[in-house]
Image (cartoon, rainbow, N blue to C red):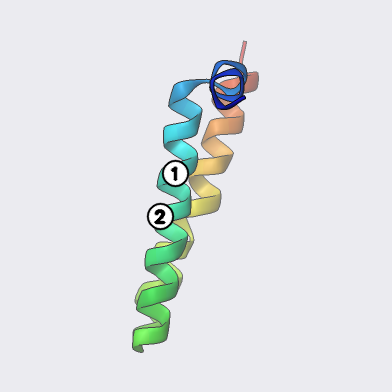
Amino acid sequence: MIKNFIERIGAMNIVMLLVVFSIIVVSEYIFLAGNKLDAIFLAIWAPTILGFMNYFKYRK
């Protein structure tokens, strides 16, 4: 089941989704630690990476 999921989505997309998830987790940690502006700056990268993933996926 996991192998089928990886084949369908692609290994590089899985890696990028893990990177996005880790950015969100680290941003939440920084936010709760009190550095709100740093956390917001870091959190902006998650949708940016997802946007680039969509752009390169549908580009022809």
Residue for badge 2:
22
- Asked whether, in this view, residue 46 is left or right of residue 30, the answer is right
Residue 39 on image: x %, y %: 40, 73
Q: Residue furthest top?
A: 60
On the rendered image, what quadrant is the N terminus found in? top right
User: Mark 2: few, some, or many residues within 10 Å (few <14, many ≥20)?
Assistant: few
Specify the quadrant of the image occupied by residue 42.
bottom left
Find out whether the residues at labels 1 and 2 contact each other: C-beta distance under 8 Å: yes
Residue 58 on image: x %, y %: 65, 20
On the rendered image, what quadrant is the C terminus found in? top right
Element at label 1: helix
Q: Amino acid at mark 1?
A: Leu
Specify the quadrant of the image occupied by residue 33.
bottom left
Give the camera-side residue of 43 and 19: 19
Residue 14 on image: x %, y %: 49, 32
- Residue 18: assigned label: 1
Element at label 2: helix
Q: Residue at x 46, y 23 (%)?
A: 11
Measured along the vertical axis of the image, is residue 10 above or below residue 27? Answer: above
Q: Residue at x 56, y 27 (%)?
A: 2
Q: Amino acid at mark 2?
A: Ser
Measured along the vertical axis of the image, is residue 56 above or below residue 20? Answer: above
User: Mark 1: few, some, or many residues within 10 Å (few <14, many ≥20)?
Assistant: few
Specify the quadrant of the image occupied by residue 18.
top left
Residue 52 on image: x %, y %: 52, 35
